[in-house]
Image (tube, helix red, strand yellow):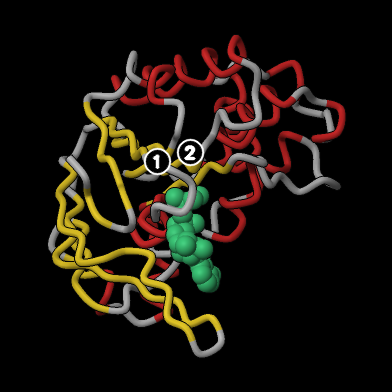
Amino acid sequence: MSSLRLESVSKEYSMGDRLVRALDSVSLEIQAGELVGIAGRSGSGKSTLLNLLAGMDRPSSGAIWAGNRNLAAMSSRELANHRQHTVGMIFQFFYLVTTMTALQNVALPMAFSGVAASQRLDRARSLLESVGLRNREDHLPAQLSGGEQQRVAIARALANDPEFLLADEPTGNLDSATAQEILSIFKELNAQGRTIICVTHEMELFSGIVGRFIRLQDGKVAN
Ligand SMILES: Nc1ncnc2c1ncn2[C@@H]1O[C@H](COP(=O)(O)OP(=O)(O)O)[C@@H](O)[C@H]1O
Ligand SMILES: [Mg+2]
């Protein structure tokens, strides 16, 4: 179990001849086993921070430590490997493969990491069961409600048994009752020891489950 630690991390994007500083010298630490919310206005750098923690992107400067490994110093190949085995991601708009069933979507990440076919389906079934969707395994995403699609996406994120679950506004597209179901799943996964980092601007909703919020303002930590 590793902590995540940012040391003076900045991220700049060039927009034509202009430089946008999405994160400005951010230092923070998230302990293994925490359930942390990342809050802040639109444009404050939440998604940028989450993508850096996930190893989806590299900082312009600074270090990002997952345990004793610095993601900022990894090659693209090492970073891809780190993501595959250590990180599960969940998004506002689910991003399921529309032509695949729920079961196939959940099994997909295991195909990339070389799990045997029979084992993939067994594990995918038990993951769907754990999010209450065993009876929906043959449904295509379009045949599922938003909340069900997000539960499939959570099962998929767990496919390779990641240490960190990173979610970007996972309830942003759901009604409040459905959002509560997703929060209950997060709470349970966290109780099982999974580290969860969740971007949201619904602080009130999430205050029931997160241990604390990291608040971003103009690319800096505000609290
Ligand atoms: N790929 C990109 N290219 C250029 N600017 C970007 C890119 N991604 C984000 N930004 C800018 O960086 C800032 C932070 O964006 P983001 O991390 O998406 O904020 P949030 O998720 O809090 O809404 C914003 O000003 C945004 O326009
Ligand atoms: Mg965002």
Q: Nearer the viewer, mark 2 or mark 1?
A: 1
Q: Is residue 220 left or right of residue 159?
A: left
The residue sitting at 32% across, 64% down in the picture is 23
N-term mark: 2 or 1? 2
Label 1, secondary structure: give it: strand
- Residue 152: x and y in percent read 64, 32
Q: Is residue 98 left or right of residue 12?
A: right
Mark count:
2
* Residue type at tag 2: Leu
Q: Secondary structure at mark 2?
A: loop
User: Residue 160 at x, y = what percent?
Assistant: 46, 46
Q: Which amino acid is tagged 1?
A: Leu
Residue occupying image coordinates x 46% and y 54%: 43
As drawn, the residue found furthest toward the top would be 177
Residue visible at 22% across and 50% down in the picture: 221
* Residue denoted by label 2: 158
- Identify the residue shown where x is 76% and y is 48%: 97
Label 1 packing within 10 angstroms: few (<14), some (14-19), many (20+): many
* Above/below status of 184 relative to 64: above
In contact (CB < 8 Å): disc 2 and disc 1: yes
